[in-house]
Image (cartoon, rainbow, N blue to C red):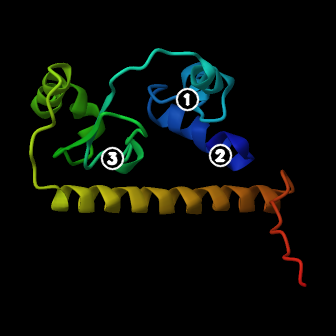
Amino acid sequence: MLGTTGAGGAALTAIAWATDEKVDGHSAAASQLDESSSFMADLHDRNRPPARVTSIAAEGDLVVPALHSALDGAATNVLVPDRGLRAHEDLPGSPEATREIALAVAGRGPTCRDLDAGVTYAFGVSYIEDGLGAVAGFGALYLDYRRGGAAAPRPRRRREG
């Protein structure tokens, strides 16, 4: 949604500037990862042979919340106990992720863990991120509307009767 409003475009530019271009929401890669991109549609439409897939997520990932990383049809969706501001960055080389990859390659199940706290934490991260995203999105639409830019979508009225 960031790139679909004037305020969102300005936010992407500010993020790129603040991160010394390390995070560029205008990049080709970011555009291709948009769920409505032609790249993603092509991936979806390809005739691929069946593959065994294991999704591994950090319960405290603030970039890709763990509950958003679960894949329909995956052999296993694994949640590893990694929290904090660097959870997304630390996950790929972490001993926990390496162990889960080794187990998946060997055709074995994931490490047994008490999931209550991890799932609760992951749910909290996901809930907060979704809420902040909704507030930011509607805020950007409102700012564009107030500036005379893109018209804010109007709610449809229910037909009575």
The residue most toward the front is: 50
Mark closer to the observer (3, 2): 3
Q: Earlier in the sequence, mark 1 or mark 3?
A: 1
Q: Position of residue 138 (x, y in %)?
A: 66, 61
Left or right of 77, for residue 6: right
Q: Residue furthest bottom?
A: 161
Residue bearing the label numbered 1: 33
Determine the CA span between mark 2 and mark 1: 17 Å
Quick check: can you spot residue 97? yes
Residue 148 is drawn in which quadrant? bottom right
Give the answer, above or below, for where 36 lies relative to 125. Answer: above
Residue 86, visible in the rendered structure: no
In the image shown, does 161 or 61 lie closer to the viewer? 161
Residue 30 in the image: x percent, y percent?
A: 56, 28
Q: Residues within 10 Å of mark 1 (few under 14, many from 20)?
A: few
- Pointer 2: what residue? 8
- Left or right of 141 in this view: 80: left
Q: Nearer the viewer, residue 80 or 105?
A: 105
- Residue 102, percent from left and from top: 14, 22
Tag shown at residue 66 = 3
Direction from residue 57 to residue 38 in the image, left or right: right
**4 displayed left or right of 156:** left
- Compare marks 3 and 2 and give the one earlier in the sequence: 2
